[in-house]
Image (spheres, grey):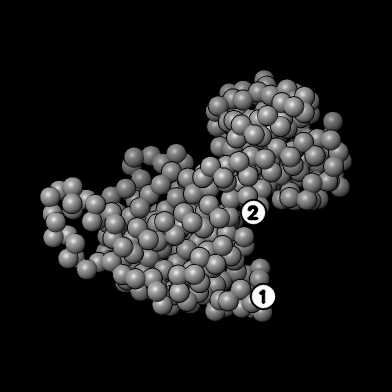
Amino acid sequence: MKFVLTHPLAPEAMELLQESGIELYVANSPKPETYLDQLKDADAFIVRVGECRAELIEQCPGLKVIGRTGVGYDNVDVAFAAQRGIPTVITPGANQRSVAEYAFGMIFALSKDIMNADRGLREGNWEVRNARRSFDLLGKTIGVIGLGAIGREVIKIAHGLGMQVSGYDPFLSQEKAEALGVRYYDDYRELLKDADVVTIHVPLTDGTKDMITAAELSTMKKTALLINCSRGGIVNEKDLAEALDAGTIAGAGADAFTTEPVVKENILFSAKNMIMTPHAAAQSREAFINMSMACAKGCLAVVHGEKWAHVVDASAYENKKDT
């Protein structure tokens, strides 16, 4: 039994795989085409960073499972894999607290104007303390787009801070959304108009690509903050940069980008009041262990013939794998 990994998992998960008698190849590379010789006889491919497209899957006749350490799977051709009887394992719930806290880290940094205060102080400007750009979150409205596991953690934290919470999720009924203690919106554009802070927690799909463009940004409050700790491509980067520079909204934070790693020419680097981090929201020590263990256990279960619950497309179990 052979597992190929783009990058190492947490030590606890690597130990689990080794104790299971698995042959391991760790590429330390997001470019699987450069180690295709290793993948061609692999039973499992665990993708932390990089892509697993149809052309690659076609060349791996022994592949039984694809693993993703997280809940995003836009970098895996899930449908093609499922057609060939190859489930894609994901790790829902493993990183929800980490991402929710990270989103609030950005919210606190922006609402308290910490970046500008730090920069001003370093430049010798003590009077930056009187800029009056910061504001309190108590009583403000946070709009949560996506009420899955991460969105629900955001709601818990927001309630603890005394915030009003609005929510949008097309896959959740109004009754279920309101049971979470949120004001339900069936149109996220209306939520954008009313919220003081908006935080996005949806996957990147054809339906969410460019979900927020200049048209949507123009309807938001000039004092509003926008946080994206989900996937690049959901918020149009050019439109966001222009909105920040024009003062259409007050600030934004992004942990995910259309092109990753981010190139220095990305327009957001020069945008006003913009926080950018390297897709690190789910990389706390605890979340990394949780995701690694869940992915390793799921992939081991599948290669041993079990039907693991946390897969993207369960039809893979019903499709006879080509040989």
Q: Quadrant of residue 169?
A: bottom right
Horizontal and vertical percent for residue 242?
31, 59
Three-letter code for the amino acid on which mark 2 is drawn: Gly
Three-letter code for the amino acid on which mark 1 is drawn: Lys
Q: In the drawing, does residue 307 fall left or right of residue 132? A: right
Q: In the drawing, does residue 139 fall left or right of residue 204? A: left
Classify 38 as above or below 81. Answer: above
Q: Residue at x 86, y 47 (%)?
A: 318
Residue 282 in sight here: yes
Q: Quadrant of the N terminus?
A: top right
Q: Which residue is mark 2?
A: 93
Residue 51 in sight here: no
Q: Which mark is residue 32?
A: none
Between 118 and 211, the residue placed more toward the observer is: 118
Secondary structure beneath dot 2 equals loop
Q: Residue at x 34, y 60 (%)?
A: 110
Are there few (<14), some (14-19), or many (20+) residues within 10 Å of tag 1? Answer: few
Horizontal and vertical percent for residue 62?
79, 29
Q: In the drawing, does residue 4 fall left or right of residue 106? A: right
Q: Which residue is mark 1?
A: 176
Q: Quadrant of the C terminus?
A: top right
- C-alpha span from label 1 to label 2: 19 Å
